[in-house]
Image (cartoon, grey):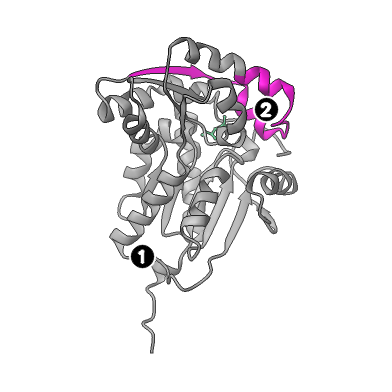
Amino acid sequence: MPPVPSPAKTLPIAMFDSGVGGLTVLHECLVSLPHEDFVYLGDTGRFPYGDRSPEQLRDYSFELAELLLGEGAKLVVVACNSATAAALPQLRDALAGRVNVVAVVEPESRLAAEVTQNGQVGLLATPATVDSKAYERELAHAAPKATLHPIACPELAPMIQDGNEFDQRIVDAVEAYCEPLRGAGVDTVILGCTHYPLVRPILQRALGRGVTIVSSGQAIADAVHEKLTAENIENDTGRRGRYSFLSTGDPEAFRAVGTRFLQMPLGKVRQVDVREPRQKAA
Ligand code: DGL
């Protein structure tokens, strides 16, 4: 008789972002951990997060994490830099003893520290993430001699999520955001927003071939695997996992944009209610 898995092992891994950006993280997890189930929540009803205050982002993060735990989850992944930068220590404290939290920011900083040769590291992120100085703190820890060159990109995530990711406006915006980084001679650029890998080819062309782009996807997938192993809650590796989606905005709009970005079928997206939605549609 095969051993009966503990309930925690069979629960899904929960993940949230302000919208579709976290799908770049989900995709890496689906590839690395095909035997796990995932539930992804896109807070499209309150998108974008990039101009929110730290207090709002903390409230939203607590609310979304509780919502996901209410659905049943064995681990929470914060696939949003703005939320991580504002809320990670408090969220970890609030969920201590219930579930572990894996988040962005630290993994990208560690990767950038490993990759940079000249110590000049660029950061492209939302205003909320840049203002938090979370990347300064993490990079100072990982590479004390490196210098961070942060650029706030208020328009980029909304342009990507609005579904115009390949039009000239994005190319122009990317060129303008990358210009000071070229001037500073960075050899490494952190994509400090989970939406940005969706326009990676445009970013790479604007930055030039000599610049290494660092993003969180694979590092998060590795961190998730480590946590599952450490806690002995990895699901049976012989099975094929399922994934499902929740959205706080219009589920059909989320499905349409999400399918294009994930390039995998999303299935039915379930709408969930949260406090203070900014908009009705996705
Ligand atoms: N994807 C999110 C991040 O990583 C935020 C984009 C936004 O909502 O402004 O920061």
Q: Is residue 206 left or right of residue 92?
A: right
Dot 2 alpha-carbon crowd within 10 angstroms: few under 14, some 14 to 19, many 20 or more: some
Residue 22 is situated, as x and y percent measured from the top left of the image, at 54, 42
In this orientation, which residue lies closer to the viewer: 263 or 241?
Answer: 263
Q: Is residue 243 left or right of residue 231?
A: right
Q: Which residue does the image show at 71% across and 31% down from the upper left?
A: 166
- Which label belongs to residue 18? none
Disc 1, SS: loop
- Which label belongs to residue 159? 2
Q: Which residue does the image show at 67% across and 17% down from the upper left?
A: 172
Q: Which residue does the image show at 63% across and 44% down from the upper left?
A: 248
Question: Residue under circle 1?
Answer: 233
Quick one: quadrant of the C terminus? top right
Residue 158 is situated, as x and y percent measured from the top left of the image, at 65, 28
Of mark 2 and mark 1, the one earlier in the sequence is 2
Number of numbered discs:
2
Q: Is residue 1 left or right of residue 244?
A: left
Disc 2, SS: helix
